[in-house]
């Protein structure tokens, strides 16, 4: 053993040289080997995979931002379209009202229904015109089709309207053909049918006659269409008359408010008459 170490000590330089040569030959051999080629190829593929994923994540991040931007643009466009459609609808309804030959709309105040409350008894409408536009309590609200109701409460920019289809609403009416007079009221239920009360059994009223407001009313001008008689049922002293209303309240959106009918003397003289309209 000592001899081996002595030999190694004397010839270590040559031995190390031989070892280095062997290692060099080994690496040269590996340069032409398929293993290193596969390792290199695998490394390249792995690097490409990582790069592709990073690019994909970056694309998705940018895509989300682009989608958010496009969504905002679409939202803005949708809002503009809705506003334009609403403006066109309002303009069309306004022209329809002002073009109606049966009404002189120049003295009327035009308003839009902005809220409504419907039930089987107490219905309510809110219009976007108040005392700043000249709206006053007890003004008549109507459309070219017929009577809508009566103003009950007024604020600066809005007014509350009690429609015909309210159990507290009453108006004096008359038949345009037979001249039969009565009081129109609504007892609840169907929103398109009201009742004409206090029509004597001796009346010549017939089905399909048109009913309009009479001059007996303390708030409404005469001659405003109210509806048409659809059923007459005789009772002991009076007829029970069903009137199909002229106004479709389910699609009501634009209305006219007529100037206030001022007849204080008449109102006082008829204040004890139970057939007149109550003023809340």
Image (cartoon, grey):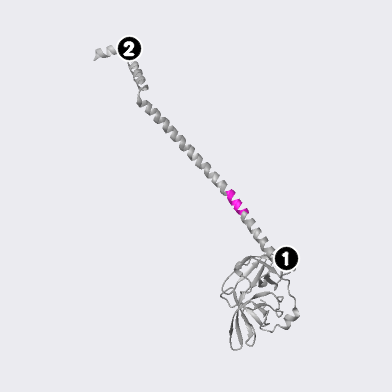
Name the chief secondary structure element in magenta: helix
Q: Is residue 240 above or below residue 23?
A: below
The residue stretch that appears in magenta? 72-80
Residue 78 falls inside the magenta stretch? yes
- The residue most toward the bottom is 236
Residue ID at (25%, 12%): 3
Residue ID at (58%, 51%): 75
Residue 133 shows which numbered tag?
1
The location of residue 229, given as percent across then percent down, is 62, 78
**Circle 2 SS class:** helix
Instruction: State yes or no: discs 2 and 1 in contact (Cβ < 8 Å).
Output: no
Image quarter of residue 109: bottom right
Locate the C terminus and report the quarter of the image it occupies.
bottom right
- Pick the front one: 224 or 171: 224
Image quarter of residue 47: top left
Q: Is residue 169 above or below residue 5?
A: below
**Circle 1 SS class:** helix
The location of residue 277, given as percent across then percent down, is 67, 79
Q: Is residue 56 above or below residue 11?
A: below
Residue 237 falls inside the magenta stretch? no
Asked whether the viewer can see residue 129, the reply is no
Distance of label 2 from label 1 (alpha carbons): 116 Å
Residue ID at (65%, 81%): 183
For disc 2, the neighbor class at 10 Å (few under 14, some 14 to 19, many from 20) is few
Locate the N terminus and report the quarter of the image it occupies.
top left
Q: Which residue is label 2 attached to?
A: 14
Residue ID at (66%, 63%): 93
């Amino acid at each position: 053993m000592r001899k081996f170490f002595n030999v190694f000590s004397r010839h270590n330089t040559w031995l190390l040289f031989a070892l280095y040569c062997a290692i060099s030959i080994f690496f040269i051999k590996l340069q032409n080997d398929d293993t290193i080629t596969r390792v290199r190829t695998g490394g390249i593929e792995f690097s490409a995979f990582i790069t592709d994923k990073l690019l994909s994540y970056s694309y998705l991040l940018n895509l989300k931002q682009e989608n958010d931007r496009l969504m905002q643009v679409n939202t803005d466009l949708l809002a503009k379209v809705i506003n334009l459609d609403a403006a066109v609808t309002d303009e069309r309804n306004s022209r329809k009202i002002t073009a109606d030959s049966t009404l002189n709309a120049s003295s009327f105040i035009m308003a839009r229904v902005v809220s409504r409350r419907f039930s089987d008894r107490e219905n309510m409408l809110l219009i976007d015109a108040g005392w700043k536009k000249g709206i006053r309590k007890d003004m008549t609200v109507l459309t070219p089709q017929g009577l809508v109701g009566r103003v009950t409460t007024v604020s600066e920019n809005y007014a509350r309207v009690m429609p015909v289809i309210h159990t507290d609403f009453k108006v004096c009416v008359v038949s345009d053909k037979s001249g039969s007079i009565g009081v129109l009221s609504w007892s609840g239920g169907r929103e398109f049918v009201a009742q004409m009360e206090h029509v004597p059994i001796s009346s010549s009223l017939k089905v399909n006659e048109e009913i309009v407001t009479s001059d007996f009313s303390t708030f409404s001008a005469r001659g405003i269409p109210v509806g048409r008689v659809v059923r007459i049922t005789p009772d002991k002293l009076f007829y029970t008359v069903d009137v199909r209303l002229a106004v479709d309240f389910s699609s009501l959106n634009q209305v006219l408010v007529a100037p206030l009918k001022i007849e204080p003397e008449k109102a006082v003289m008829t204040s004890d008459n139970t057939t007149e309209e109550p003023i809340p």
